[in-house]
Every structure is written in structure tokens, then in C-alpha cells.
Amino acid sequence: MGKRVMILTASVGSGHTIAAGVLESFFRQAPGVETVQVLDALELASDLYRTLYDNAYFALVEAAPWLVGWSYDYSDPPFRGGNALSLWDQLNTTAVVAAIRAYQPDVVVCTHFLPAKLISLLLARSELQATLSVVTTDYDFQGLWLSSPFNHFFVARDETRAYMVDFGLPADRVTVSGIPVKALFSQPVDRAAVLARYQLQPGLPLLLISAGAAGGAYTRAIVAQTLRMRNTFQAVVVCGRNAELKDEIEALVAPHADHYRAVGYTTDMPDLMRVATFFVSKPGGLSSSECMAAGLPMVLVNPIPGQEVRNSDFLLEEGAAVRCNYETTVGYKIDQLLDAPDRVQRMAASARKLGRPDAAALIVDTVLADPPRHCGSAARRSRRSSAPPRKGSLRARALRIAACRRWSTLRPADRSRSSRRRSSKRWRPSSRRRPSSTRRCRSRGPCLRL
């Protein structure tokens, strides 16, 4: 009998859901798989929870992006605040838990941290017998993605893997796979046919301006700036499901309608990306990976503080993108690139080098070959390691945090006995004045200041 595979995601933006869909198609073609089910954790949640989790997030991005960046940085350190699912999340995901129990999967793959934490909780309670693999959808790793127990993490680049291994995750359970995208992005395309489909000229550079699936209002400002460019070009503006934005763009470019094509939500992105000269948009994890697979240089605009800023840092570092820090200089920046065709070719080569079009196939093969095994938390694995942690490393910090949590679980009498057994150089009795280099954590256990 084949394996029952469940892919869990959360529709916060479109990237997590698209990645889940790509993995679904590969799992269905893989041998040894009986059934595959994709489940959106937010679809079964209450309306209030879904609104707060999705709509409120993007409203906050528009109103107070600095707060989004602060929240990302605050939750970024590994093991900060634990990796448990909050009571609020548990209460609002009871329908998701019921669906998981009814399906009884052998293999669970998560493309969002919310369902990953939910599955970890079920595994820790022995309410589910399955392997858990977590597929990250940005180029950097954030502490919110940590789940324990787990079987495998799949990350987008080598530096991320080195970072995770350094703070204590087992090296054999972290694989650099890239972010899963459709294989179509790296395959040859009939350029002439695609251009003819959109009534575009073959001899002019093509700008692909994307507002994302939801249709970002910032797209109007970008198009307005391109109207001031001195180089001759043509552009396709993808407005997503925002019909009002599409009407605004068409009205804005009406005097230059022969050079612009405004479209709504489309499944034609693989073809458009493979014939475009630049992709002008935000550096979402999935859209960036699609561009890299297609060898398409990016012009980055208005990244969300946190994960998208980290994505843009990586793409800039590798020479596959440029970033516009001012809305009023988007046209100027693109003009500078069009004036240097050699630079554009180098950017395209760098993008192609970063692309991992085989990411989904690698993830599926690794997950299906992964033996069922129970993986304790990273901190617990680190404590069993024979090599002592390097002083000041993230692994050493993780061990100290874990020690404080163990302290908090002891009864008062046991704490006293434990304190007397330890060296006075490392632990101080609570009745004595503590040196300035120590503090007490929430658990009231002595802990070195990290």
C-alpha cells in the first residue's frame, strides 16, 4: 500500500499556496504514493481568525511597515518564546485538526509555519503517526518556522542551512533544495508566439510589472514612473484580481496604449517571465524563485520589511537584481540598466545560476525516502552532542535557554537541591546578590544574560 501524503499551507499571500500546489503535482506523479491532499489551514478557521491572520497583516504592511519589520526581528532569534502553538491558534484550528485526524496521513509537508507547529503538537502528543517535513518559502530562515518534533527542513540556500546547523539542528535533516516552482519556468519557450499573443514587438525590451495575485496599489506609481523613461520599451502590467487597478492602469497609459498591455489574473506568468527583460515587483520568495529559474533579472520595489527585505539583500548580493529605494526613480533606474546591455546579460546569468527548477522533485524524493523517525527538539539534540558548543554561538545560547526551561518545570524543593548540586561559579543561590552578568528569565530560573 502506498503512502498517504498531506500538504498543509496557509493562504497568507499567494506564495505558500502556490508552493503547495507545485509539490502536490510532483507527489501525484511519484511512485509509492496512494493519495495526496492539500489543506489550507485558514480555510477551515473562523472568519475572525482568518481576517486577523491574513487581511490584518497586509493592512498593517500598508499602515505601519516599521511595525511589521520590528515584529519580524523580534521573532527571528531561534527558540525565542518557545516553538509551541499558542492557545489562540489551537482554539481556532480545531477543524483543521479534525481533518488531519480523519485523513491519517503517513507523510505531512508544510509550506507555512502555522500548520507546521500544529502538526508538531500532534506528534508530540502521540496523536499522529507521520513524518513532518517543512518547506520554507523565503531565502532566509526565521525563528517562527522552528517546529519540534520534525523530520526534515528544506531551505532555499546554503547560508541558511549553515545558520540552522550552527544553532543546533542536525545537519542530515536540513537540505538545501530551493523554493519549489513549476518546471516550466526553466524550459525553452517560443518567444515569437508569446509576443504575438500579446501583440508585442520582438525588437523592444519588455518590462513585466506585477502587482501580485491580490493587486498592489503601488503598481500605479511604478507605471506612472515608466511613462517618464527616455528609452523605448514595452510593458505588460499584471494587475492580479484587482479589477479596479486594471481600469486605472488602462486609463493612465491610454495615450501610450501601443506600448502597454494591462491584464488581470493570469496563468501565463511562466511564458511572460521567459520572454521579459526585467521583472518589476516586490521580492516575494516564490516570485523571486520563479524569476531565478527563468533567468530573469529583477527590479525590486517596495519590499515588505522583514522577509522581503532579506530576500532583496540576497538577490542584490548575488547580482541578480537592483533595488529602487524611491518610487520617483524607478524609471531612472531602469533607464540606467537599458543603457548597459552587458550588465543586463550579467544579471540574467546570475539569476540563472541561482535558479533551482528541480527543487520540487528533490523535496519529493527526499521526503518519500526519509525513514519514519522521531526527532526531538534541536536543543535536546544539541545536549546529546559530544562536541561542546562554541562560546557565544547560537547553539550555546539555545542550550542555556533550554536549561532555564528545565528549571521552570522543577518543584521549589527540587530547585533548591539542584542549585546546591551545581558549582557556585555557575549557579548562585537566590538568597545572595546576583552579579550584573546574570538575570532571571520568566521561569524564575537563573540564566546567563544572552
Image (cartoon, rainbow, N blue to C red):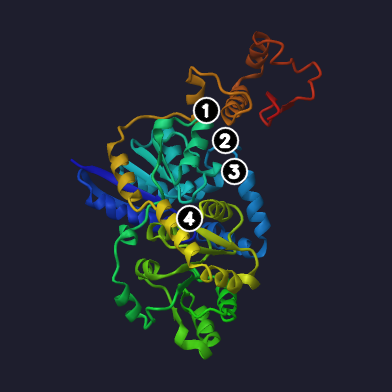
- Amino acid type of the residue tagged 3 in the rendering: Asp
Residue 46 numbered tag: none
Residue 76 numbered tag: 3
Tell me the quadrant of the picture where the C terminus can be found. top right
Q: Do the residues labelled 3 and 4 touch (CB within 8 Å)?
A: no
Q: Which of marks 3 and 4 is in front?
A: 4
Residue 379 numbered tag: 1
Q: Nearer the viewer, mark 4 or mark 1?
A: 4
> Depth check: 9 or 50 in front?
9
Q: Can residue 44 be seen in this view?
A: no
User: Residue 128: horizontal and vertical position, in percent?
Assistant: 36, 37
The quadrant holding residue 408 is: top right
- Amino acid type of the residue tagged 1 in the rendering: Ala
Tell me the quadrant of the picture where the N terminus can be found. top left
Residue 285 numbered tag: 4
Residue at the left extreme, as displayed: 1
Distance CA(mark 4)–CA(mark 1):
28 Å
Residue 442 in the image: above or below residue 65: above
Which residue does the numbered mark 2 point to in the structure image? 79
